[in-house]
Image (cartoon, helix red, strand yellow):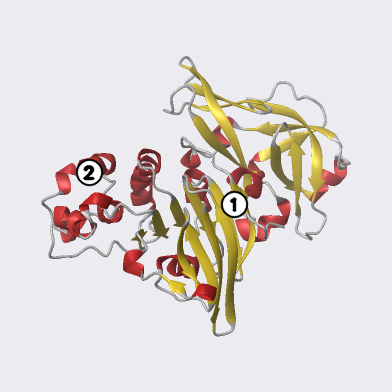
Amino acid sequence: MISVDITRRLGSFTLAAKFETDTRGITAIFGRSGAGKTSIVNVLAGLLQPHSGRIEIDGHILLDTAKRINVPPEKRRLGYVFQESRLFPHYSVQRNLTYGMRRTPEAERRVNFDDVVAVLGIEALLERKPRSLSGGERQRVALGRALLTSPNLLLMDEPLASLDTARKQEILPFIERLRDHFDIPIVYVSHDMDEIIRLADNLILIDDGRVAAMGSVEDLTSRLDLRPLTGRYEAGSVIAAEVTAHDDEFSLTELAFAGGAFRLPRIDNPLGAQVRVRIRARDVSLALSRPEGVSELNVFEGRIMEIDHTQSAPQIDIRVDIGVPLWVRITRRAAHDLELREGSKVYTLVKSTSIDRQTLSTQKTVPLSTEETP
């Protein structure tokens, strides 16, 4: 387990974060700018000193202010990947990769150089200097350098923030590979919910220096009360599913989930792969009876779980149970005309082409817990 309970005053801002997470897979930290995300990982790394607190990773105490324990950063056995690659410009890629590895005692080296090079696809870059690399290539080398220190925990602070969309899409598969290939837990900070949905096993939401909620990505993104933190405009449901069929004739893929099966334009994931499906609330329609003669391939019967009456905007948010929670956004006029109520039976319509393909990826799920989850 990773156990964190820290307090740090920074002027008028107070960081007071407490959480526990399993040391498997990726735990994402998400929040608005200034919420305290980077401060948390800097305290974990020992780069920022809390006024009080305790940090423990797999039974190893890194910080316990009550007992005057504070392990120096260089002895915490943590890897850190920053927003910028911070590679040594005068070293080759190979020397950058081995820099941290050489400072790790041989008996403690658990990560193989050739494995890292292969997983990150940087074989052809080893003799080059950082200035000749693209932004995505530099970040892959930075990932490799951090991994080769054989860390007990890998910290990644907005590692894709400085990259354009094309470079982000280039490097995301490599982060997935290292997540699945190396048995090293990752704490991943990002302000981009698409990254988190694609990569993370579990999610910690930070608001004003505190843990507002934590749990699975699917659960937190489906909660209407957390919209101010997860983002309203791009908000939607995240649903765990399994690839069960490919339709070669119509180039479609079928994804089974607890309420049925989605059909969407064909994806490359193999049969049996566990994936996440993101469906934006604005891309779902409602009907009171099962529709006929419509183009939508995804129609599911459900019941309204929750209607948000707190907003005065022209749209209204509704959560529908279709075997899993599905978030729907329609106009207030439509909700009025349909006479929608909590408990009402409805049919949800989802266009195959509206399912977000950018967040689809093979997933692993691990448990997460906290005492501060509301």
Residue 11 location, x and y as percent?
Answer: 55, 85
Identify which residue is drawn at 35% across, 69% down.
73
Identify which residue is drawn at 35% across, 59% down.
77
Viewport quadrant of the C terminus: bottom right
Task: For mark 2, give the secondary structure.
Answer: helix
**Nearer-the-camera pick, 319 or 219:** 219
User: Where, by quadrant of the figure, is residue 321 drawn?
Assistant: top right
Amino acid identity at mark 1: Glu
Disc 1 versus disc 2: nearer the observer: 2
Residue 156 location, x and y as percent?
Answer: 40, 58
Identify which residue is drawn at 58% across, 79% down.
13
Above or below, comparing residue 263 to residue 38 in the picture: above
User: In the figure, is residue 226 to the left or right of 92?
Assistant: right
Above or below, comparing residue 371 to residue 69 in the picture: above
User: In the figure, is residue 166 to the left or right of 190?
Assistant: left
Residue position marked by numbered label 1 in the rendering:
234
Asked whether residue 33 is in view, the answer is no
Q: Residues within 10 Å of mark 1 (few under 14, many from 20)?
A: few
Task: For mark 1, give the secondary structure.
Answer: loop
Residue 27 location, x and y as percent?
Answer: 50, 51
Residue 351 location, x and y as percent?
Answer: 61, 32
User: Where, by quadrant of the figure, is residue 159 drawn?
Assistant: bottom left
Residue at the outermost top position: 249
Asked whether residue 201 is in view, the answer is yes
Residue position marked by numbered label 2 in the rendering:
117
Q: Earlier in the sequence, mark 1 or mark 2?
A: 2
Amino acid identity at mark 2: Val
Residue 354: which disc?
none
Is the residue under label 2 in contact with that under label 1 (CB below 8 Å)? Answer: no
